[in-house]
Amino acid sequence: MSKHQNKGNRNRLIDGFGREHSYLRISVTDRCNLRCFYCMPHEGIEWLDKSKLLNFDEIERLARVFVSMGVEKIRLTGGEPLVRKELPRLVERLSAIEGLKYLSMTTNAMLLEQYAEAIAEAGITHLNISLDSLKPDRLEKITGRDCFDPVMKGIGKALAVGFPSIKLNVVMIAGVNEDELFDFIEFVKDKPVNVRFIEFMPFRNNDWNIERVLSYKEMLERIETRYSLSPLKAEPSAVAKDYALTGAKGTVSFVTSMSDSFCGSCNRLRLTSDGSIKSCLFYPAEVSLRDAIREGGSDKKIEDLIQYCLGKKPEAHPPAEEIAAAENRAMIEIGG
């Protein structure tokens, strides 16, 4: 048995609704080299002082505690994770944790050409790349930066390195990029890449309103006027509805956060870059694990705090309009 296999069911991360949690998203930084309007508010963001961020020792310790409790998959997020100095060192340390089956990352690909080989060698196998337009001018408008060329080079490098899983995350927004549905499918058609169309979600000051949400069913109907799709079997806890694209290497998925919630099978927990655990992306409550560590807390103390936070997890997130009006961190502060 390899170090990445578990002996039986050891999951202790079970909430009040019987959901087992085996997936942890760790934000390693709140900084980003892009300024996507749906993620980062125009104002009101205060960057964290370095001293408030979890250091690599703290991240590794918390990851080990989570894995001991039942986490099998960790995804590194940000901000943009690759702006965190010496990130491949952290990847190497996390990939060595016994019991961890998958170590993945979400990136905007701006620095991927430089770091793809290093993070692959260190242990990243599953890579999600955020890309909301294939039009250079439009991408610059969405991200606030002239980024098309480095992003395309980064994607090319990732394909050359040969990560076992590469996904493109596309936040589809009515009136912004909805005319690119077919363009994205053509882009992945001859590549071993999964394009994931994500419904526009509300966060603080991100210009969300229900009229700008392009639903999964609307997207599917449009795509099926031109392409033949067939459903793929997915894990019960999967956030995406996956489809094969007839005659193509690439696949198509839809993340239906707004129109068809997957709360009932949620298996995710989030750790912010300043060390707070959040049991739900849209639930403002959080508990600081960083403070417990720095106050000399034992692993048992950390486990108790994790269980306390998990015990507060709601059965489902509220309707979109309520989420939009609630006080919560911006997406960049929580972790993508």
Image (spheres, helix red, strand yellow):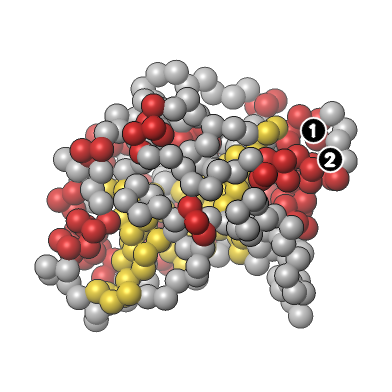
Q: Which dot, 2 or 1, sits closer to the camera? A: 2
For image coordinates 48% across by 52% down, the residue present is 263
Depth check: give the residue in front, 295 or 137. Answer: 295
Specify the quadrant of the image occupied by residue 305.
top right
In this view, 175 is above or below 327: below
Identify the residue at image location x=80%, y=35%.
293
x and y percentages locating residue 143 in the rendered image:
32, 36
Instruction: Using the rendered view, name the quadrant where residue 250 is placed.
Output: bottom left
Residue 43, how many percent across, how many down? 40, 19
Q: Nearer the viewer, residue 250 or 65?
A: 65
Say above or below: 245 vs 263: below
The amino acid beneath tag 2 is Lys
Helix, strand or loop at mark 2 = helix
Q: Disc 1 residue type?
A: Ala
x 60%, y 43%: residue? 313
For image coordinates 57% across by 52% down, the residue present is 268
> Does residue 67 appear in the picture of this structure?
no
Circle 1 Cα neighbour tier, 10 Å, few/some/many (<14 / 14–19 / ≥20): some
Q: Quadrant of the N terminus?
A: bottom right
Q: Determine the secondary structure under disc 1.
A: helix
Q: Residues within 10 Å of mark 2 (few under 14, many from 20)?
A: some
Location of mark 2 (residue): 301
Residue annotated with mark 1: 292
Report if the CB atoms under discs 2 and 1 are less than 8 Å apart: yes
Say which label, 2 or 1, has the lower sequence index.
1
